[in-house]
Image (cartoon, rainbow, N blue to C red):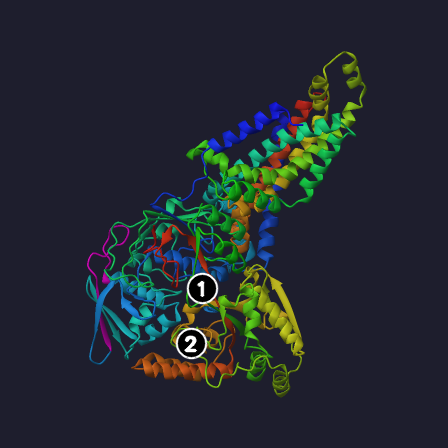
Amino acid sequence: MMKRRTLLGAAGGMAAAAALPRPATSAAPSVLKFVPQANLTLFDPITTTAAVTQNYAYYVWDTLYAVDEHLAPHPQMAAGHTISSDGRTWTITLRDGLKFHDGSPVRAADCIASIKRWATVDPFGEDLAAAVDSYVVKSDKSFEVRLKKPFPLLDAALAKPASNVPFIMPEHIASQPAAKAITIDQVIGSGPCVFEAKEYVSGSRAVFSKFAGYVPRQEKPSWAAGGKVVNFDRIEWHVITDPGTAVAALQSGEVDWWELVLPNLIPLLAANKDVVIGQGNPTGYMGCLRFNELFPPFDNVLMRQAVMMATEQSAYMRAVTANDPKNFTICHSFFPIGTTYGVPPSPDPMAKAPDLAAAKKLIEAAKYGGEKIVIINPTDFPSIQPFGEITYATLKKLGLNVQLVETDWGTVVQRRASRKPVDQGGWTIFHTWWEGISLYNPAVNPIILGQGLKGWFGWYKSDAMMALNADWLSAPTEAARQAIGAKMQALAFHDVPTVPLGQFYIRTAYRSTLAGVIDGAAPYPWNVHRV
Amino acid sequence: MLFYIVRRVIATIPVMGIVAITVFSLLYLAPGDPAAIIAGDQATTQQIAQIRASLGLNQPYLVRFGHWVWQVVHGDLGTSVFTGQPVARMIAQHIEPTLSLMILTMLIAITVAVPLGVIAAWKHGTWIDHAVMVFAVLGFSVPVFVIAYLLAYVFGLGLRVLPVQGFVPISQGFWPFLQCLILPSLALGAIYVALLARITRAAMLEVLAQDYVRTARAKGVSQRGVLFVHALKNAANPVVTVAGLGVALLIGGTVVTETVFAIPGLGTLTVNAILERDYPVIQGVVLLFSFAYVIVNLIVDLLYSVFDPRIRL
């Protein structure tokens, strides 16, 4: 039987606990607490293609042009441009009042230096750089881009929405080589938020404050275009790597917004009336199986076609979306479904997949000699690991000599850069995914470009593809570009440098006290406000 | 004793030297390329090579090792290849949470475990003794992260009296600081309590069987006096030894606990650095942990002479 002393003690303890201050929730109206997808450790969006760096860069810097929700480019820092009658001179004028975070004005020279630096690392930028004859500063607020030949997509290039994005930095910062990353002390932005370097703690926190000197455009925001009005004085990024903790923090109100929600946690959050599940990036993520074409057996196009023939996209997609068909789209295309070029070809070579019998016939025709196939696969990437395991099982069914090597992602990316044979530490197949927005047109789409050793891992080489790409860049109309894009897609389905594995979506989630979250290429901080 | 302390401190130099060579060599040999991670998934081989060259990662082993040792000897642990921040500054940013977590965990653990062990020994063979041992087994068996999730669920999400994540420095208020550490300390402390309770119980059982304890009882010393004045003091040495060795357990446990509760401590820093192959940070943290462990062992040895005056250092 409980003693009175014990009962009184328990009651007193509970009363004391109730009287204690509750853990702070983000009720302060001027602070937004956001959980990013990863730890922010790199501060240079030109040196790295890391998505978390791109997202932070959208806070800190602005761009000359930006795309809206229809992926159409619009002037952003630019007030506008004129094009000479021969199409070879673009004159770009900056808007009034643009400033960097150190108070210095944004000048044409800053823009030119930033574009040049970006163009040394980005495929679309490289295409632009190849067409540029010179940049000429006309005044502090305007400059000319003088081209060797017309480049109708110059504004689209400067509006590139995903890594690498051509952010505008001060000239003295942008003058350093792209391989030399800018440091935390060199972050001088041109965008709506100031990065508070002194408050940065790696693995824990990044803090941004609203830049009072930012001049937003007057239009309504649409993706990265339009008026970037930040409604919070302070935005805190709280790095929470454990999904269980992140979901608890969102439910308890300790944070306001969680960028990427694991698919199997969505039902839990959906049942919480204080949480809203958002779309996130509408173009989703495109799973890829990539071949190493330097060595057998996948230097043989018939072998690559055989693997594609045996691929069942729904198996891959169900594995990374907790078996929820609402979170994926079958995508027989190298461009994301829902975008201009994201249309399956006709006839569709993947329509009958998986066809193991036909695949085996192709393998026989390819005279496969039993060469070892090494699949390098990460164990610490839940949205990629299943891809490798499914491919391994498929290739075993095809009777191929295959080994699955599973390591952490760091080891995968190291081995992936090797151009040696598998018995000297090389690889044959790896898997990854691309944000759909990174693949939305041919110029930005490394999974089909045939640049050979200068291109993306796998080193697919196709002069025909590069010729089509050149035609696409100089095509005078959108109809002409679409026709060329269809040809590029058809060639890609013939050569199969990559096997598309489907298009899946990773949702975002935020407290119901927030509104105005824009679904786009990044978790933009503008337009979000507390209701 | 002073000579003993000086001798032990000097002896740390070759220990640290061996640790430095070992950790640097292991990292050099381990797979992974920070340049590839920096460049990102969409980069090309050329971009990775350029970054590797700009970071000096393609220099020979001896050049890189010599450069690093030269820096360390001059008190410079280098800079992170990712953030560009000095490693010493990064460690300084992350040390308060880890130290706070470890100290609070040890305080809670010792405060709970020693009395539990004493009571279990006193009530040897009774249900109290069995209950303490069952608790000890559970403390060993249930993983830290399971306890952590349960505590977060009950006290964070359910009762909403404590936060499920984060850390507030003590400079921003004692109660917010303590709030953030209570659940992590309880989670991390469970295994420590289990370990110490068992050791205390075993040591006490041995001591309680001694003649001088029987003499004390015969002289009319109270039970409390027998247990906590005569017996515990003589049972302290193995407890102190295990407490010192348990610091290594704590260091390992903080990694998991800090991850679950999103505490920006040295554990988090280490895990992130390992996954990213941030070599200078890994090297700096391992050196620090090694040095700390050596110092802890020195303190344990000094405490022996405090608890047992017969021991001369």
The magenta segment is A88-108
> Residue A27: x percent and y percent?
38, 43
Helix, strand or loop at mark 2: loop
Type of the residue with mark 1: Gln
Quadrant in which residue A128 is drawn: bottom left
Residue at the extreme top of the image, as rendered:
B219
Q: Chain under label 1?
A: B
Question: Relative to residue B3, is residue A105 depicted above or below?
Answer: below
> Residue B230: x percent and y percent?
72, 19
The quadrant in which the C terminus of chain B is found is: top right
Residue B50's label in the rendered image is: 1
Q: Which residue is mark 2?
A: A342
Type of the residue with mark 2: Gly
| Residue B282 shown in magenta | no
Residue pictured at 56% horizontal, 68% vertical? A318
Residue pictured at 31% horizontal, 53% vertical? A230
Question: Relative to residue A100, is residue A78 depicted above or below?
Answer: below
> Residue B92: x percent and y percent?
47, 40
Looking at the rendered image, the disc whose residue lies closer to the viewer, 1 or 2, is 2
Quadrant in which residue A338 is drawn: bottom left
| Residue A93 shown in magenta | yes
The quadrant in which the N terminus of chain B is found is: top right
Mark pair 1, 2: CA separation: 34 Å
Quick check: can you spot residue A425? no
Quadrant in which residue A386 is drawn: bottom right
Question: Relative to residue B52, is residue B238 depicted above or below?
Answer: above
**Mark 2 surroundings within 10 Å by alpha-carbon count, few (fewer than 14), some (14 through 19), many (20 or more):** many
A103 horizontally vs A500: left or right: left
Quick check: can you spot residue A130? yes
**Mark 1 surroundings within 10 Å by alpha-carbon count, few (fewer than 14), some (14 through 19), many (20 or more):** some
> Residue A312: x percent and y percent?
57, 75
Closer-to-camera residue (A404/B180): B180
